[in-house]
Amino acid sequence: MKPIRTRTARAIAVAIVAGSLALTGCSSNDGGGKGKSDAKSQKDAAEQQDPVAYGDAAASTGPAQEVPGAKPGGFINVYMQSDLTHMDPGQIYVSDAGQFANLIHRGLTNFQEDEQGNLTVVGDVATDSGQTTDGGKTWTYKLKDGVKDEDGNPITSADVRHTIERLYSKVIFDGPTYIQSWLSGNDYRKALPDGPYKGKHLPDTVLETPDDKTVVFKFSQPRPDLPQALAMAGYAIVPAKQDTKEKYDKAPAALGPYKIAEYKPGKSMKLVKNTQWDPKTDSVRHQYVDGYNFTSTVSQPSQTKRLISDQGEAKNAIQFTDSVDPAQMADVVTDPQTKKRTIQGYQPYVWQLTFNLDRVKDKKVRDAITYAIPSQSMVQADGGRYGGEIAGGLLAPTLPGFDPTYDPFGKLKKPNGDIEKAKELLKEAGVKEGTKLTYAYSNTPRGQAQQVILKDALEKIGFDVQSKEIDRASFYEQVGKLNNPYDLYMTGWGQDWPSPSTVITPVYDGELVADGASNYSHIDDKQVNELIQKALKQEPEEAAKTWEQAHHRIVEEINPAAPVYYSKQIQLFGSNVGGAKYSTESSYIDINDLYLKQP
């Protein structure tokens, strides 16, 4: 899902046309092998923003540009700690599934990334990034010839309509909600409660498919970011003929270069080439390797150990969305040969300790906990300077307009917390010693290590902390329930595209308090809601000021989530893996360009 650079006049002009600025910098895969040992800094984050271009038909026409030296053949081994959260596109809103989606799914648009990390929105199933003649209220897409699903069924506008309409049904409970709410309002499910499954459809005044090759989106106000929203994995195509409703999450039909050959839930998955994928229709993806062998039982420490050793199958292996194990970080970054086999970059994510406002109702209590958090120790548990930097607010350094001096809780001055200030606030709030707090955490090495740190800090200020472990694959589903039994939980959020609108709206808009929504704190503040609606109707330059106003009110006057740290990425890959580089679009290894040097 960034400044610190000043937005140039050109950038602002492009932003008005395109809708937002974007995270576009890139860390090339020299792995610091030239002697550079520093981790990525906020200066690097600033370099990860340039205007996103909207590509025309020429830019959207395949095949994708060849990767120098790439060879065909062989299988890449993929190491994961746990199973994918989802495989149904409509349910995909978490990074592991988003990374996976680019291998098997295709949407109307996609992000094309060059060697420098510059991003262009191009047509994927569509012929271009979209056409609008009225400032973004109406968008028209024409579909490419030759795009088929894995069984050879041609993709038509009916499949695009079906894809959008199924998101309105109860079959879909996770995933992004931008386009649905843009088309039908925040209570969009009421417009088509059964989706397309009982023969009803959205009216042509909202979504029109005049012929097999044309799709027209019609909004009540300009939506200049639509091409970027459509590039999200959550809006990838689900062919009407292939839709098995709930079962689709375990066996989706492929449109991309690979398809599922074998899947053992919680254990493994094998992808093989999708012979119906035509590279002439795809300007983003390649099909160099014969497939991917996913193993979802390899812990982060084991992944790191195997890849450091670089023996046997590990030579052909990658970390998918996991990072180098913090405990083994020194072994990686101090050895030049190992460090050559890393990719690094600044991620768009902010880790925050989220408060369940239905349970932690007193702001003084929330502030006390915020002051008590030892942010530096939390960063250390996630790789130190290679894993993140202490956060002052809830917007990442990769977003336009980021203010590096913003630090209302004084975290930069007191990185290990202010216990005395916390105790003082709790005394004012009348909180008794031994008051219970329930903290939910993900059962990952990072989650487990940070749970110990947080529990210790909160017990120092007088709380009795009840820690509840949740399986990584279902963590966000569990804390996303309105009636969840937890007081606190660590959540990470990154922009869906580089605009504060994609952070503040989904996470802090009171209109989006619902089961399965991303408003994990359940914040519903009238002033914040009004500022969100105001910003969404403004041009980017004016909107930036409104988003900043909303951000300050959220952090300082409500505090639904305590900022902890800004996230960075460092991942390992085997010595036989070619084409490895950091993707500024995914914030992980670029899955589109990989090959095996010796198949």
Image (cartoon, rainbow, N blue to C red):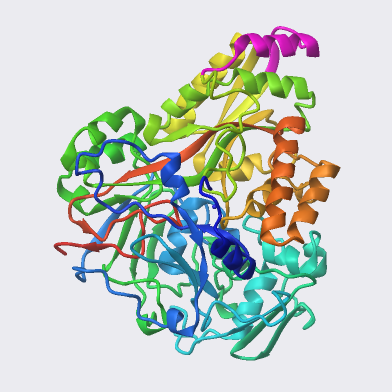
**420 is within the stretch colored magenta:** yes
Q: Nearer the viewer, residue 366 or 292?
A: 366
Give the residues in magenta. 416-436
Residue 376 shown left or right of residue 164 in the figure = left
Residue 236 shown left or right of residue 428 in the figure = left
Would residue 462 be visible to someone looking at this image? no
Total marks in image: 0
- Residue visible at 71% across and 61% down in the picture: 170
Find residue 141 and report its image quarter: bottom right
Residue 192 shown left or right of residue 95 in the figure = right
- Farthest residue to the right: give it: 526
- Residue visible at 72% across and 31% down in the picture: 556
Q: Nearer the viewer, residue 293 or 365?
A: 365
> Where 486 sits versus 195, above or below?
above
> Where 505 sits versus 128, above or below?
above
> Where 185 sits versus 526, above or below?
below
**497 is within the stretch colored magenta:** no
Residue 213 spot, x, y in % from top left: 59, 90
Find residue 486 and report its image quarter: top right
Quadrant for the C terminus in the image: bottom left
Would residue 249 be visible to someone looking at this image? yes
- Residue visible at 76% across and 32% down in the picture: 558
Residue 468 spot, x, y in % from top left: 58, 27
